[in-house]
Amino acid sequence: MSSVPLRRNRDFVLLQGGQLLSSAGTQLTQIAYPLLVLALTHSAAKAGIVAFARALPLWLFALPAGLAADRFRRKRVMIAADVVRTAAVTALGVTVLLHHAAFWAIAVVAFVEGAGAALFGGAQLGVMRSVVPKPQLPAAMNVLTARIAIVRLAGPPLGGVLFGVTRALPFLADAGSYAASTASLLAMRTPFEEEREPESAPMLQSLVEGIRFLWSSPFLRTIVGIFTLSQIVFPGVSLAVVVIGRRQGLTSGEIGGLVAVFGVFLLLGAAIAPFVRRLLPTRVLIVLEFWTWAGCGLFLIWPSVYVLTATIIPTALAIPTTDSIVWPYQMSLTPDRLMGRATAAVTSLTGGTAALGPLIAGFLLANVSARATIGVFAAFGLAMAAWGTLSPAIRAAPKLEEI
């Protein structure tokens, strides 16, 4: 199996193809949610609340979702998550189409969609390891990052354009993408997990086992801690681009184009990641990404949404290389029976702050200046950079070929 190129690995192609469509649908509504709330309520704070409602379940349900992925058939868990999201987003699209959408209903659907993402995500890395041989995991992660970059590139501007055509269209397209993901999962043949014995440990003990595993590795626990801060910065700055862009007179399509800039350079970063990994030591590559997060502080000098967009370009270039180092390391070390819970442990620790990012941004933008808002996120970026630079665990990080 290891000699088969990824492009000829049928189940890997099916998995990534289905997730390409699903992720594209998610990106359509990533911009459509705040645009819809702003159109109905004219409130940046309420736009932040909806973004918070969508991100909160990634933290709230992460550990239970990971346990479900380790105790039940992963394929059934992932399909159930897609079916629930298809129904919820379809219902929202219909209410928007009929001009009956209410703010509370938007928040509820965003929450349900986030819950489905938590359930799906708890099983996703385990499935990746099942269909991809370990030596090919770094290359597979590059493909995954490139997929994310493509949808970040195409999704936001398309979401803005579709929203301009009719407000319901991005949500209906998102529902269709979840249906396509379900079809791809059904077509896969490789077992999604190894044979495993039923667990008899108490539920609470099983839930925290993934956290204990991560904590046992100084490198992994440091990375997760710093990523926890990064999950405040990126969602917060992303929402700020939408709100500030709207305040500075940009159309929904233009705002989508700005958000897509991140995807352009994420895709470029994925293309150059294999070469960059050979040029610099692992610890340098990881710390380099952390320093880029502080770049949004340039907005304090020149408060233009275009400048704010430009400051996230170095981060987009750095992320694929970091991901291709960190996640293969985690997947290679984690036993299959703990894959769901170890992944969920990461998600539970980072997902809560991912939910806080847009909430903080929304309330700050509603109550203080845009400069002050971005200054808060720049401070988080500096904290990440200092932590990563001074960390003994990152300084002693192994080379990728040693993983």
Image: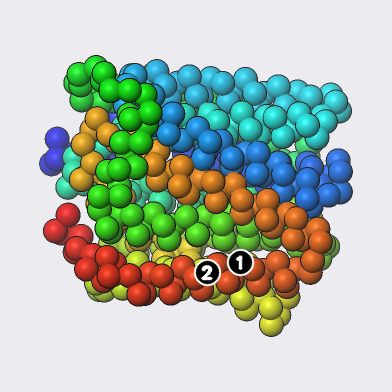
In this picture, is 329 found above or below 171? Answer: below
Q: Residues within 10 Å of mark 2 (few under 14, many from 20)?
A: many
Q: What is the three-letter code of the residue carrying label 2?
A: Gly
Query: Quick one: 79 or 115, which is closer to the camera?
Result: 115
- Say which residue appears at 51% left-offset and 45% top-offset: 351
Q: The N terminus appears in which quarter of the rendering?
A: top left
Location of mark 1 (residue):
377
- Say which residue appears at 39% left-offset and 42% top-offset: 345
Which element is circle 2 on?
Answer: helix
Q: Residues within 10 Å of mark 1 (few under 14, many from 20)?
A: many
Question: Could you say which quadrant of the image residue 79 lies in?
Answer: top left
Location of mark 2 (residue):
381
Residue 119 screen position, x and y as percent: 46, 29
> Is residue 164 visible in the rendered structure shown here?
no
Q: What is the three-letter code of the residue carrying label 1?
A: Phe
In this picture, is 279 found above or below 355? Answer: below
| Image-based side of 397 in relation to 243, left or right | left
Is disc 2 in contact with disc 1, using a CB cutoff of under 8 Å? yes
Residue 135 screen position, x and y as percent: 17, 47
> Is residue 400 visible in the rendered structure shown here?
yes
